[in-house]
Image (cartoon, helix red, strand yellow):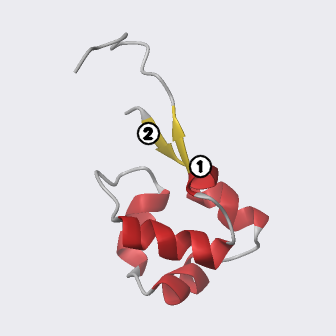
Amino acid sequence: MGIVVNLDVMMAKRKMSLTELAGAVDITLANLSILKNNKAKAVRFTTLEAICRALSCQPGDILEYVEDANQGSRIL
């Protein structure tokens, strides 16, 4: 997948546990874990906003685009 979620990196920088972040964002541990482990297919902007607020960061601190070498460039 081209989008990588670096949530674990930001959580470590802020010394925040998954449980603490889940409580601050009002999201289940299971859903937050799916996001943290790059298993999510989508994320709502409201959720991303709440995560950024709780971690005092920007969306670009959490989300990263990595080009997939197998796909090359595609025009959509």
Indicate the amino acid at tag 1.
Gly
From the viewer's perspective, is residue 48 above or below residue 28?
Answer: above
Residue at left 56%, top 56%?
59
Residue at left 61%, top 78%?
54
Measured as percent of width and height from the top left, residue 32 is found at 43, 70
Measured as percent of width and height from the top left, residue 9 is found at 67, 55
Indicate the amino acid at tag 2.
Ile
Q: Quadrant of residue 21?
A: bottom right
Measured as percent of width and height from the top left, residue 14 is found at 76, 70
Kindly give the residue lying farthest to the left in the view shown: 76
Q: Quadrant of residue 76?
A: top left
Residue behind mark 1: 60
Residue behind mark 2: 3
Q: Is residue 76 left or right of residue 4?
A: left
Residue 10 or residue 45, whichever sits in front = 45
From the viewer's perspective, is residue 62 above or below residue 11?
Answer: above
Residue 63 or residue 36, whichever sits in front = 63
Q: Is residue 7 left or right of residue 31?
A: right
Task: Indicate the secondary structure of the residue bearing disc 1.
Answer: helix
Badge 1: residue crowd in 10 Å (few <14, some 14–19, many ≥20): few
Q: Give me the disc on residue 28.
A: none
Q: Is residue 14 left or right of residue 65?
A: right
Kindly give the residue lying farthest to the front in the view shown: 76
Measured as percent of width and height from the top left, residue 55 is found at 66, 72
Task: Indicate the secondary structure of the residue bearing disc 2.
Answer: strand
From the viewer's perspective, is residue 24 above or below residue 33?
Answer: below
Mark sitting earlier along the chain (1/2): 2
Residue at left 34%, top 60%?
43
Look at the numbered discs 1 and 2 and tell me whether their residues touch, using CB distance below 8 Å. no
CA separation, marks 1 and 2?
11 Å
From the viewer's perspective, is residue 10 above or below residue 18?
Answer: above
